[in-house]
Image (cartoon, rainbow, N blue to C red):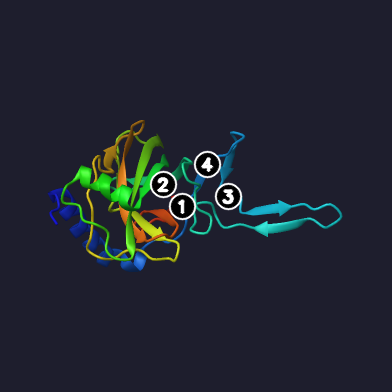
Amino acid sequence: MQFNLKKMLSLSLIGLLTVAVLGACGQDTKDVSIKSDDNKQESTKKTSDTNKSEGTEKKEETKSKLGSRTNPVPFQTTAKVEDELFNDNGDSFPIKFDLTVVEVVRGDAAFQKLKSMNEFNEPAPEGYEWVLAKTKVKFTESETQDLAFRIDGIMNFKMVSESGDIYSGDVIATTEPDFSFEMYVGNEKEGYITGLVKTGEKAQLRYEEILDGQVFFNLQ
């Protein structure tokens, strides 16, 4: 299979960064909020739910943090993610950006679409199927206008099968438009993220900063 230069450089950088920061990777769920049906903000700070039943005592049920693997962001729901940027002096600047999985295609339909994007994209290996997720990002808030936000479909995202599998083989596909962007506050972009999941299993998309947490999105 042939890869474009950008993808080859990205994969090489992933390997180097993984070795360099393996012991320091942030596995905590980032702070996320979503728009609920009644247009009120549902925050990750709310981690418990109260169930009421007539004639019985009030019962509290603890929930996992929104955006965690056990409580992922619902499909086609916009998540407002809190993060930060750093300048060369190490000063941090809080930011917020919106992430939305707009559309998901799987299996042979996904492969045919990938083939139309790049004729050298290969079929999924045995036991796996392609997932193609059209995803939108909008850089909404920042305490500085001088630093750009970077996000990349290979560097920052993984497909996770329901069984917990994350494909680690050497079959990779390229997409068009690719989800790899650098932007300043106020800008928004849309592109495709692709990956392999176990055939027939439900799947999630995991957004991850190497040093600063992760967010899971349902893909169905």
Question: Between 66 and 133, which is closer to the camera in this rendering?
Answer: 133
Amino acid under disc 4? Ile
In the picture, the disc for residue 45 is 3
Q: Quadrant of residue 124?
A: bottom left
Q: Measure the C-alpha gap from mark 4 to mark 3.
A: 12 Å
Measured Cα–Cα span from mark 2 to mark 3: 15 Å
In the drawing, what numbered circle is on residue 34?
4
Residue at screen point 59% across, 33% down = 39
**SS at mark 1 in the image:** loop
Q: Residues within 10 Å of mark 4 (few under 14, many from 20)?
A: many
Q: Disc 1 residue type? A: Lys
Where is residue 36 drawn, in percent x and y?
Answer: 58, 39
Q: Position of residue 94 (x, y in %)?
A: 41, 43
x and y, in percent, of residue 118 in the image: 18, 46
Is 45 displayed left or right of 179 in the figure?
A: right
**Residue depicted at x 39% and y 55%:** 212
Pointers 1 and 4 in contact (CB under 8 A)? no
Q: Earlier in the sequence, mark 4 or mark 3?
A: 4
**Mark 2 residue type:** Asp
Say which label, 4 or 2, has the lower sequence index: 4
The answer for how far apart the CA atoms under marks 1 and 4 are is 13 Å
Q: Which residue is mark 1?
A: 30
Circle 2 Cα neighbour tier, 10 Å, few/some/many (<14 / 14–19 / ≥20):
some
| Residue 83 - label | 2
State whether residue 183 appears in this view: yes
- Callout 2–callout 3 Cβ contact below 8 Å: no
- Give the vertical position of 192 relative to 202 (above or below): above
Q: Are marks 4 and 3 in contact (CB under 8 Å)?
A: no
Q: Residue furthest top?
A: 186
Relative to 31, 91 lies left or right: left
Where the N terminus falls, by quadrant?
Answer: bottom left
Up-down relation of residue 188 to residue 20 (above or below): above
